[in-house]
């Protein structure tokens, strides 16, 4: 049985930084993942097409699908502007699925300024959980909406690059795009 928070629409498109896969429901964007190329060493996080089809089976209201598709179109436009360095803030509605703690971490990430990096510890303090540094790292790694929820801006407390689901090379490219040198 489909839940209102499951994705019902999907869009894949190519950018100069790689192929992206976006998913949405009527509430907003649920996923934004890079699709690995043959050379990439990281695993895909893309939502399976069959899952989208299965989720649509539970839809009676076609207006929900139309709204989800509008979220995808808006996200695509905003991402293209971001990659062209014409956008620093995203306005598309977000609807990530996660625990309350994960959502707190992801919300804190969206509040970072365009060219601002931070550490896991700084995010932990920002959400008033200063001892939850490792849990923040785990939530950061579970982020389903890359770029817009800018988990790539989290670096080590000593200023070094730390892990990224899509590889450190891509993380470094995204940081450079935003004017950050690490």
Image: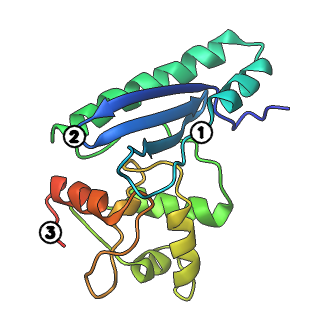
Quadrant for residue 68, please give it. top right
The image position of residue 88, as x and y in percent, is 23, 46
Rounded to the nearest angstrom, the CA distance separating label 1 from label 3 is 32 Å
How dense is the environment of label 3, judged by Cα within 10 Å: few (below 14), some, or many (20 and up)?
few
How dense is the environment of label 2, judged by Cα within 10 Å: few (below 14), some, or many (20 and up)?
some
For the residues carrying marks 1 and 3, which lies nearer the camera in this image? 1
Mark 3 or mark 2: which comes first in sequence? 2
Mark 1 or mark 2: which comes first in sequence? 1
The image position of residue 151, as x and y in percent, is 41, 61
* Residue 92 visible in the shown view: no
Q: Can you say whether 42 is above or below 90 in the image?
A: below
Where does the C terminus fall, quadrant-wise? bottom left
> Which residue corresponds to mark 3?
181
Quadrant for residue 6, please give it. top right
Of residues 177 and 20, the one nearer the viewer is 20
Indicate the secondary structure of the residue bearing disc 2.
helix
> Which residue corresponds to mark 1?
47
Of residues 34 and 110, the one nearer the viewer is 34
* Residue 155 visible in the shown view: yes
> Which residue corresponds to mark 2?
83
How dense is the environment of label 1, judged by Cα within 10 Å: few (below 14), some, or many (20 and up)?
some
Q: How many marks?
A: 3
Where does the N terminus fall, quadrant-wise? top right
Left or right: 55, with 125 as reference point: right
Extreme residue in the front direction: 38
Rounded to the nearest angstrom, the CA distance separating label 3 from label 2 is 17 Å
Quadrant for residue 13, please give it. top left
Indicate the secondary structure of the residue bearing disc 1.
loop
Residue at 63% x, 35% y is 48
Residue at 70% x, 23% y is 53
Q: Can you say whether 60 is above or below 174 in the image?
A: above
């Amino acid at each position: 049985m489909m839940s209102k928070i499951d994705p019902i629409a999907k869009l894949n498109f190519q950018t100069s930084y790689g192929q992206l896969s976006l998913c949405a429901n009527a509430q907003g964007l649920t996923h934004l993942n890079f699709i690995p190329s043959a050379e990439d060493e990281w695993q895909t996080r893309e939502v399976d097409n069959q899952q989208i089809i299965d989720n649509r089976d539970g839809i009676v209201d076609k207006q929900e699908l139309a709204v989800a598709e509008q979220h995808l179109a808006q996200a695509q436009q905003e991402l293209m502007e971001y990659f062209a360095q014409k956008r620093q803030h995203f306005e598309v509605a977000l609807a990530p699925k996660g625990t309350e703690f994960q959502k707190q971490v992801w919300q804190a990430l969206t509040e970072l300024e365009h060219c601002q990096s931070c550490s896991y510890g700084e995010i932990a303090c920002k959400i008033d959980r200063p001892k939850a540094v490792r849990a923040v790292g785990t939530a950061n790694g579970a982020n389903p909406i890359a770029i817009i929820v800018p988990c790539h801006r989290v670096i080590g407390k000593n200023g070094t690059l730390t892990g990224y689901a899509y590889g450190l090379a891509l993380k470094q490219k995204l940081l450079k795009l935003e004017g950050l040198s690490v």
